[in-house]
Image (tube, rainbow, N blue to C red):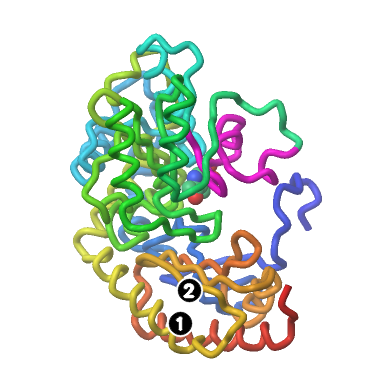
Amino acid sequence: MSGTLMSTYSRLPVSFTRGEGIWLWDQAGKKYMDAISGIAVCSLGHAHPAVTEAICQQAAQLVHTSNLYGIPKQEELGQTLCQLSGMDKVFFANSGAEANEAAIKLARLYGHRKGLEQPSIIVVEQSFHGRTLATLSATGNRKVQAGFEPLVKGFIRVPYDDLDAIQAVAKSSPDVVAVLVEPIQGEGGVRIPADGYLTGLRALCDEHDWLLMLDEIQTGIGRTGKMFAFQHEAIQPDVITLAKALGNGVPIGACLAKGKAAELFQPGNHGSTFGGNPLACNAGLAVLNTLKTDNIIEHAAKIGEQILSDLNESLSDISAITEIRGKGLIIGIKLDRPCGELVKQALEQGLLINVAAERVIRLLPPLIISDAEAGQLVEQLSALIRSFVSESAAA
Ligand SMILES: *Cc1c(COP(=O)(O)O)cnc(C)c1O
């Protein structure tokens, strides 16, 4: 079926032809509940009318002109993102990895401006930042890196959620210029740091004159019950990267910077042919406008709490579950054994879920999921987990 496609993915045996809200239909007409949103992308659900209209209207008017010219839609989206985030300036790219590349380049430029010729960036274990050479080098997962050495230099790795480890690096490494972390690790298995972690990072960055760079590619745009995950703490980062949900499926990435970080790039330092074209930006504007006018983020915060407490209740007697954790609508259910098989079993029953870090069932449902749909998700998933753990052995 996919003989000419490079085997970068081991795909599940299903193809979808249509979507609406949290639902997808396959080629045979079977219906599925999408509890993964195309990996945290379709937060407004599939075929959202406001996004569809924004795409169609913009496609009929003007798709692309390049960054050689002014792009009013890009300026408008940039302004909206800055208002929402408290940041000053935006660079638009087409993906998460590219947004992170921009952040990494900003950090290096920041170092060079300070006279550091070998600037390094502190990154953490079990992180995920993308598949380009620099971003896979920043990623804390050997599987992502293996076979692609030599890695890009200039990253120092510490454990996640460990401020002391960073303080120790500060003492031994004078070339550090920035810290790059996810506020919640998505691919790493929905790992949520202790309250105060970001505040502690902010203090360390201030103390040492480093940039605090947050990869909000998965957590941003409402996923955690706030527009940005950093807004759960009273801090302001120097750099944020965004992508996934920003275009609800239209490829777009963004690197936002504040203060000293916002003034680093000058003409010729960075660029993108497609980045921030009118089509992608109009989709992004429709997403942000819809989130606001329909109060969707408040809804996501509430329904996320409801799902967490319902899962806790319905799974409380299953000892194979070691932790249920989440914030807003990024939710992880950790098992004491590998559970990749559950993805196939769920698929057969018309439910799309994902497993991260081998043992963590990851849920990233569209933020527009209704109370009734959330109830159905908990019920169906609980039954699946129950039969899975009774048929598989702990490992
Ligand atoms: C998905 C993701 C990326 C990579 O985004 P791409 O669009 O696939 O390049 C980077 N960081 C985080 C936290 C992600 O979840």
Q: Residue at x 37, y 74 (%)?
A: 369
As drawn, is 19 to the left or to the right of 371?
right
Could you say where residue 313 lies in the image, as x and y percent from the top left?
Answer: 43, 88
Label 1 vs label 2: CA separation? 8 Å
**Amino acid at circle 1:** Leu
Work out whether residue 43 or residue 328 is closer to the camera in this orientation and state it.
Answer: 328
Q: Residue at x 61, y 87 (%)?
A: 386
Magenta-span inclusion, residue 393: no
As drawn, is 99 to the left or to the right of 229?
right
Dot in front, 1 or 2: 2
Judging by the rendered image, the residue that carries numbered circle 2 is 324
Mark 1 element type: helix
Magenta-span inclusion, residue 132: yes
- How dense is the environment of label 1, judged by Cα within 10 Å: few (below 14), some, or many (20 and up)? many
Q: Residue at x 57, y 49 (%)?
A: 126
Judging by the rendered image, the residue that carries numbered circle 1 is 311
Respond yes or no on whether mark 1 lies under 8 Å from ligand 1: no
Mark 2 element type: strand
Could you say where residue 109 lies in the image, as x and y percent from the top left?
Answer: 40, 17
Above or below, comparing residue 200 to residue 324 in the picture: above
Q: Quarter-wise, where is residue 252 in the image?
A: top left
Could you say where residue 175 lies in the image, as x and y percent from the top left?
Answer: 45, 20
Which quarter shows the C terminus? bottom right
Residue range of the region highlighted in magenta in the rendering? 122-146
